[in-house]
Amino acid sequence: MIKNSADDLYPDDLFELSAFTPYLLNQAAEAQSDVFSRNYRDRYGMLRTEWRVLFHLGRHGDMSAKEISESASIHKTKVSRAVRALEEKRFLARVTSAEDRRSERLSLRPPGQEAFRRLSAAAQDYEAALERHLGKRDARKLRELLKRLGQP
Amino acid sequence: MIKNSADDLYPDDLFELSAFTPYLLNQAAEAQSDVFSRNYRDRYGMLRTEWRVLFHLGRHGDMSAKEISESASIHKTKVSRAVRALEEKRFLARVTSAEDRRSERLSLRPPGQEAFRRLSAAAQDYEAALERHLGKRDARKLRELLKRLGQP
DNA sequence: TGTTGTTAGTTACTTTTGTAACTAACAAGG
DNA sequence: CCTTGTTAGTTACAAAAGTAACTAACAACA
């Protein structure tokens, strides 16, 4: 019997791509992102970074771009662009900080607060659907494991 | 006591971003990707899509771009660009298929096979480190859950 | 053969991201 | 005050990804 080149290269003990966690992470992140965020984008014209920033502002109250950037691990240029986009949508206002005139206090305006409420409601619905899909126990386990991986 | 605007917007039952699975997926995927693939890129000058294609070819033997695209869920333009890059690196050769002259058989050349061996060894090392970090049981559980999320 | 519809792969164009360099403001020390 | 060094945020440029339209080849059928 003739062995093909894949057999030669790949003894059976060499592992499948589907056993490679970073690959699976990517696949899963993309798939979930497509379900939620692309959907959201089409409906509300918001980019992922934008609603992340929105979410942080809504959740934590007024913050500077720097604080958002650190707390969300988003690069400052990305935050800067998202802030401008949200400002153009009248979702937030900036006020130069009195103590340090380099930085700005960002705060949600009423339309931004409204968008935030809709966004977090959608997020909760999504999360509930996921729990139904995976089961409560596994959904929780997944979040726990992802948190552990997200830190380093 | 004065409540701040975040309290008004956000009764305590509204959930944290850190309870939102797509967010955690993204954070984890980015963090892991930075550890492995960025590293690999700097060392071997290969883009993520490129080593994904390489991996598929190494694992499954000769394939067409279409087959890779389907089996890896990578858009065909991305595959096309990765194939060209790998060809320029002399990692693979294309042969127009005799049965259907639209499609091409892609096969790894020796340098590509060598790169693939190094790549899969690195991937295995990485996976082993992850198992040490999470524990064997949790690492397996994570892969299982990610697979379930990656499908839909 | 000629027409219509489909498919593999590429190319052109647009959007988004990453990287580096920049501006303006601050801070500490001389 | 006047360096020197640092920081918040922006901008300019380059790299990557997504989208759409294209070419060449096929297939089926009149």
Image (cartoon, coloured by chain):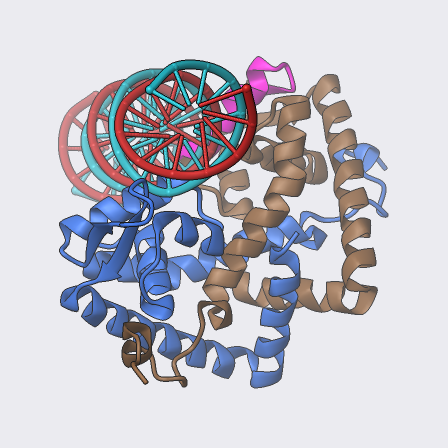
Chain colours: A blue, B brown, C red, D cyan
| Residue D18 x, y percent position in the rendering | 34, 42
Asked if the magenta segment contains residue B24, the reply would be no
Percent position of residue A130, x then y = 47, 76
B65 shown above or below C22: below
Q: Quadrant of the N terminus of chain B?
A: bottom left
Q: Residue at x 63, y 71 (%)?
A: A144
Query: For the magenta stretch, what is the residue range?
Result: B77-94
Q: In this rendering, would B39 be left or right of B69? A: right
> Is residue A144 visible to the viewer in this orientation of the structure?
yes
Position of B11 relative to B97 (above/below): below
- Corner quadrant of residue B145: bottom right
User: In the rendered view, does A44 fall on the left or right side of A101?
Assistant: left
**Left or right, A98 with reference to C2:** right
* Residue under the point 49% across and 83% down: A132
The residue nearer to you, when weighing A112 against A133, is A112
Pick the front one: B110 or C27: C27
- Identify the residue at image location x=30%, y=80%: B3
Q: Is residue B79 magenta?
A: yes
Residue A85 position in % (x across, y down): 21, 47
User: How far from the left and from the top, in percent, is residue B46?
Assistant: 60, 26
Q: Is residue B32 left or right of residue D3?
A: right
Classify B121 as above or below A112: above
Q: Nearer the viewer, residue A89 or B47?
A: A89
Residue drawn where x is 69% and y is 35% of the image: B61
Q: Quadrant of residue D29?
A: top left
Query: Quick check: A114 above or below B94?
Result: below
What secondary structure prevails in the magenta region?
helix
* Quarter holding residue B123: top right
Residue B62 appears anywhere in the view: no
